Amino acid sequence: RVAVSGSHGTGKSTLIAAFLEEHPAYVHEPEAFESLADGIELTPSEGPTPEGLHALLEHTIATVCLHKPGALVVLERSPVDYLANAAASERSWPRGSVASFLEASVRVVPDAMRHLDLIVFLPVASRGIRPRSHENPRFRKRVDAVMRRALIDDDYDLFGETTSPRVVELSPCPERRLAELARCVRSGQISSMRP
């Protein structure tokens, strides 16, 4: 049970497509926005509103929890992605909304984490994939910074349990990522504790 996490425009879909081509036994769970886009209200420049992001988080948690131990599934985004998006939305959300969202979400996300074995984090990189023209590059970098603190530094205390997924940061070079992901999955270490 693998989740591919990262800010927008970091190559999640590209990596997952390449991985599925080489690992056809895996099921693909697309990111929540693909399923719920028509019902998600967006801010003018920085992604979903608090209500929209809450709907995406709920959908993602429900999807993650469907998969039992031993399932072969790769998910586009993890619940942590939505915490990072919220924390990076301070400039576009009403005052107090970020704190309220995080306070409520940090209570439910850790339970969902035990339904994942591995989260791979795709960082924003200067030599990597360029954001699309409609994407706000500053917001993208803020999400990336918060996601690094959440996944790698565990700023929200999400990964302290023995059932927590392992978290691995993949290379900023897109051409290396497929081999790195395949190696993580093959290694048999994906159900171990965080290093």
Image (spheres, rainbow, N blue to C red):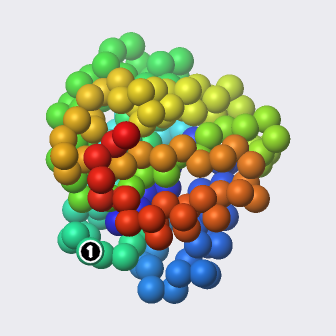
Residue visible at 47% across and 70% down in the picture: 186
Q: Is residue 190 left or right of residue 17?
A: left
Which of the image's four quarters has the C terminus?
A: top left
- Residue at 41% of width from left, 19% of height from top? 94
130 lies above or below 25: above
Placement of 9 over or under 182, stated as above or below: above
Q: What's under tag 1, amino acid-wise?
A: Gly
Residue 183 coordinates in the image, percent (x, y): 54, 64
Relative to 2, is 140 above or below? above
User: Residue at coordinates 73% horizontally, 37% vertically from top-left?
Assistant: 125
- Does 136 appear above or below 119? above
Q: Quadrant of residue 134?
A: top right
Q: Secondary structure at mark 1?
A: loop
Residue under label 1: 70
Q: Is residue 127 left or right of residue 76?
A: right
Which residue is painted at 64% across and 29% down in the image? 141
Camera-nearest residue between 64 and 166: 166
